[in-house]
């Protein structure tokens, strides 16, 4: 384990983070909201810390290996949260640094769980930075950073494998730097398209950018206390629903579609499964809230589609308080929390690809009971899935559920009720944001005990980095040479 190289790369990551703060600094100058000094201080402190790390931990000539890649990703996210919290703290947004860290990491991990009680009272630059943390974290700060690694003589495939969501990291181009650039081109294209559509629909440019950041990153931070429900607009609901679904699909498929390989897009089994879950979930939810007498058929379909897309893609936007819906509709949303988006998307949770493989593997075991001597392979897209991949998927699922149970027990021990404990953990480890009970869509996380916030911060990071990347740091062998 080359600790010096690891710290050096984290210093570079923080330097990039400081550069990204220039954007909200410009926003503060445009709106003259009084936060210019805040961002200048935050940039200065972050740059200073970055330069110290870079200077005292000069990189060796060694190529970055698997261990260093995992360590940079895991520790880099915590580091980004620590420095990303500076604008909130210096502006006095929250009374404690823990709350600032919670909000920052909720942004970078695209969770969208907030400890803010009055969003609309914040200065525009702080709101913009809050949403920008989503956008940066969506495709991954580290995926962007590896695009410049060749200029400093360090390879990036290990970082890419550790960062890109899902059990398998697709290489779209022969060189990893080209892969990173390709992913970001798609990401930028979708960002521009949604900003334009929202602005054409009447949303001001500032809110268009902020809500696009939250949509494309499947994060869910809004500039309004009532989230998307503030607008009461069928047009906005439709545009955001479409882009939430696009963000929940593997970005490698988007690249294939944009380069003319449409068949690759619609033949993908995971994409069909994802859209199938969305369709079934929408119809059942719409039927439930229509039968409950809350809405007419058209409104039920509109709100059902938006909310299922929001939870399934782990975005967390809301148009209504779905905690007032019938229990069947609430249960469907809870199930969507555990499914999540596609592998290779900006969505979180278990992910559709793993769900498919778990179901196929379980079905294989049933067939083995009938044909004990048969050789039966699990196949995906017509290809046999290696046993080590299946083992990795089961290992992830067990760790995910173990973390869910352990964190839920801790929150219950801290005095939170059963529904709040379970859904708060599910919503943070799945990077969704709103849960039920005391952390429902009309509530927030501000009232939770400090110990509960620390637990949920860990859940957010573990969920964003898919458990393995963080847990591996606690294995003693990881740090040995």
Image (cartoon, rainbow, N blue to C red):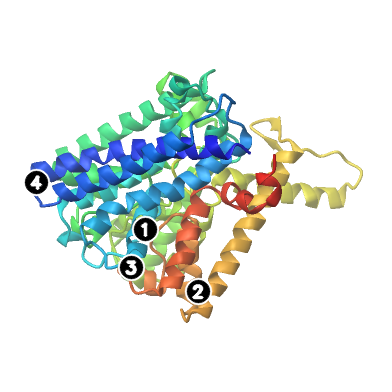
> Which class describes the residues within 10 Å of circle 2: few (<14), some (14-19), or many (20+)?
many
Q: Report if residue 290 is visible in the image.
A: no
Residue 266 horizontal/vertical position (percent): 50, 31
Q: Are marks 3 and 2 in contact (CB under 8 Å)?
A: no
What residue sits right under mark 4 in the picture? Answer: 31
Along the viewing direction, whichever of 233 and 210 lies nearer the viewer:
210
What residue sits right under mark 3 in the picture? Answer: 444
Residue 39 horizontal/vertical position (percent): 21, 46
Residue 52 horizontal/vertical position (percent): 39, 40
> Which class describes the residues within 10 Å of circle 3: few (<14), some (14-19), or many (20+)?
some
Mark 3 lies on a secondary structure that is loop
- The residue mark sitting in front, 2 or 1, is 1
Q: Quadrant of the C terminus?
A: top right
- Quote the CA–CA distance across marks 1 and 4: 25 Å
- Quote the CA–CA distance across marks 3 and 2: 15 Å
What residue sits right under mark 1 in the picture? Answer: 101
- Quote the CA–CA distance across marks 3 and 4: 28 Å
User: Tag 2 or tag 4, which sits nearer the N-term?
Assistant: 4
Mark 1 lies on a secondary structure that is helix
- Quote the CA–CA distance across marks 3 and 1: 15 Å
- Quote the CA–CA distance across marks 2 and 1: 19 Å
What residue sits right under mark 2 in the picture? Answer: 411
Q: Report if residue 465 is visible in the image.
A: yes
């Amino acid at each position: 384990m080359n600790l010096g190289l690891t710290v050096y790369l984290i210093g570079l990551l923080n330097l990039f983070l400081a550069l990204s703060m220039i954007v909200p600094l410009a926003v503060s100058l445009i709106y003259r909201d009084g936060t210019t000094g805040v961002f200048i201080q935050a940039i200065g402190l972050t740059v200073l810390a970055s330069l110290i790390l870079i200077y005292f931990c000069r990189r060796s000539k060694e190529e970055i290996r698997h261990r260093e890649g995992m360590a940079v990703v895991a520790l880099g996210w915590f580091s980004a949260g620590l420095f990303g919290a500076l604008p909130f703290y210096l502006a006095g947004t929250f009374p404690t640094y823990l709350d600032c860290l919670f909000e920052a990491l909720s942004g970078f991990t695209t969770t969208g769980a907030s400890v803010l009680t009055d969003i609309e009272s914040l200065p525009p630059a702080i709101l913009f930075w809050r949403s920008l943390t989503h956008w940066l974290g969506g495709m991954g700060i580290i995926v962007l950073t590896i695009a410049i690694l060749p200029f400093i003589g360090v390879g990036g495939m290990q970082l890419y494998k550790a960062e890109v969501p899902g059990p398998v990291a697709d290489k779209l181009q022969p060189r990893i730097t080209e892969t990173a650039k390709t992913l970001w081109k798609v990401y930028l294209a979708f960002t521009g398209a949604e900003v334009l559509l929202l602005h054409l629909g009447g949303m001001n440019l500032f809110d268009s950018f902020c809500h696009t950041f939250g949509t494309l990153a499947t994060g869910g931070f809004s500039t309004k206390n009532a989230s998307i429900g503030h607008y009461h607009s069928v047009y906005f609901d439709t545009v955001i629903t479409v882009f939430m679904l696009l963000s929940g699909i593997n970005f490698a498929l988007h690249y294939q579609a944009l380069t003319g390989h449409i068949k690759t897009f619609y033949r993908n089994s995971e994409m069909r499964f994802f859209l199938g879950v969305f369709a079934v979930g929408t119809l059942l939810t719409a039927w439930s809230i229509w039968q409950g007498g809350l809405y007419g058929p058209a409104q039920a379909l509109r709100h059902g589609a938006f909310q299922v897309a929001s939870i399934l893609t782990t975005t967390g936007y809301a148009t209504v308080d779905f905690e007032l819906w019938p229990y069947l509709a609430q249960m469907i949303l809870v199930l969507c929390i555990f499914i999540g988006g596609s592998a290779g998307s900006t969505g979180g949770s278990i992910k559709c690809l793993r769900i498919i493989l778990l179901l196929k593997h379980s079905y294989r075991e049933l067939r083995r009971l009938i044909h004990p001597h048969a050789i039966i392979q699990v196949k995906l897209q017509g290809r046999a899935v290696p046993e080590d991949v299946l083992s990795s998927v089961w290992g992830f699922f067990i760790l995910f559920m173990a973390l869910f149970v352990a964190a839920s027990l801790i929150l219950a021990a801290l005095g939170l009720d059963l529904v709040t404990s379970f859904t708060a953990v599910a919503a943070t480890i799945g990077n969704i944001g709103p849960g039920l009970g005391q952390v429902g869509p009309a509530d927030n996380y501000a009232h939770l005990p400090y110990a509960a916030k620390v637990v949920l911060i860990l859940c957010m990071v573990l969920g964003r980095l898919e458990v393995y990347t963080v847990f591996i740091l606690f294995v003693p062998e990881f740090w040995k040479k």
